[in-house]
Amino acid sequence: MSLVLLAGTSNPVLGEAIAGRLGLTLAEREASRFPDGEMHIEIRTSVRGCDVYLIQAAGPPVEEHLFQLLLLADACRRAGAARLTAVVPYLGYARQDRRATGREPVGARLVADLLAAGGIQRTVAVDLHSAALEGVFGMPLEHLTAVSLLSDALRPTLREGTVLVAPDLGATKLAERYARLLGLPVAFVHKRRLSGERVTVRGVTGDVRDLAPLVVDDMITTAGTMEAAIGAVLEAGSRPEVTVAATHGLLVGAAAERLRGLPVTRVVTTDSVAAPDVGSLPLERVTLAPLLADAIGRLHDDRSLSELIVHT
């Protein structure tokens, strides 16, 4: 069965990098819009009988990129693809995995159902907000982690006296994975979310005094959580030399402005979404291409992914 890679418009640079790693050329497709705004997709490469991998991050604008992924999948299915796998470096709506107040949708479940309805048979994602999200997917979900890639990027410049900081209890296991690789102590910030952008902090567990914080999370959206966590560890006596690391650097809204107003010397993320415009923010991006290319090659050859996936 031939291997075919097809990239949407959300992050074409990453798609090209993955294809290059595998020694392939991306399949040709056309993405356009009708005058009324409807998206139109046309596959220009035969995929009949092929093992097709659709590379599309569901980042901002999330609904547009998700629906384009569904159109790509339907086009491939109707064109005779033998197997369809969605490679979604960032999966929008992953945070909406439960009802917090009782009168809300479970957005993550809805997205999983839509992907299945589009004919996708397997999904590959990276550092989801919660590993429990696998429970809402009826299809196989390969949950990869970029922690090793980010740790390799962080290690050469780590100073003596660095402490890993989880900005909330939800990031505890993530921080512990970094700690195992980097050999660092861990501290935890107790946070309560007030809204999509506003959070409040109740305290810090762990010793941060006179230590340089390395704050890790799965994503930075508006940086409200990061701002609160950094403020808390500074108040607890940490050194004003802060490094921030997250797999998904969405950096929307006032995120760049918030981080520039703090003693942040380094922001390290991956290229799971297209590069945001952050001005003078000291942003470094680590490519996911080696990780995703390795996963695609293993899946195509029916080999194990145990070295690449999240273990909780």
Image (cartoon, helix red, strand yellow):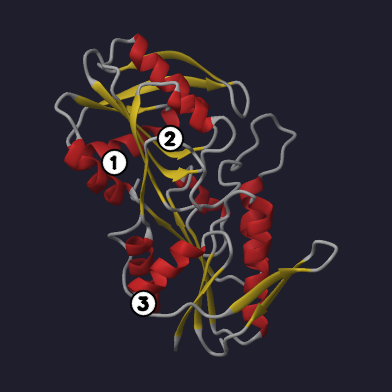
**Mark 1: amino acid:** Arg
Camera sees residue 223: no
Of residue 103 and residue 260, the one placed in the foreground of this image is: 260
Q: Residues within 10 Å of mark 1 (few under 14, many from 20)?
A: some
Can you identify the residue that label 1 sits on? Answer: 177
**Mark 3: amino acid:** Asp
Placement of 89 over or under 1, stated as above or below: above
Q: Nearer the viewer, mark 2 or mark 3?
A: 2
Residue 128, given in percent of the width and then of the height, sits at: 47, 47
Secondary structure at numbered mark 1: helix
Can you identify the residue that label 3 sits on? Answer: 302
Secondary structure at numbered mark 3: loop
User: Label 1 vs label 3: CA separation?
Assistant: 27 Å
Point out the tag, 2 or 3, that comes first from the N-terminus: 2
User: Label 2 vs label 3: CA separation?
Assistant: 44 Å
Judged from this view, the residue extending furthest toward the left is 160
Residue 161, given in percent of the width and then of the height, sits at: 17, 23
Q: Residues within 10 Å of mark 3 (few under 14, many from 20)?
A: few
Placement of 80 over or under 190, stated as above or below: below
Q: Which dot marks residue 280?
A: 2
Placement of 310 over or under 291, stated as above or below: above
Q: Is residue 120 left or right of residue 205?
A: right
- Number of dots carrying numbers: 3
Quadrant placement of the N terminus: bottom left
Of residue 32 and residue 147, the one placed in the foreground of this image is: 32
Secondary structure at numbered mark 2: loop
Residue 135, given in percent of the width and then of the height, sits at: 53, 52
Point out the tag, 1 or 3, that comes first from the N-terminus: 1
Q: Which dot marks residue 244?
A: none
Q: Nearer the viewer, mark 2 or mark 1?
A: 2
Q: Is residue 203 left or right of residue 105?
A: left
Camera sees residue 15: yes
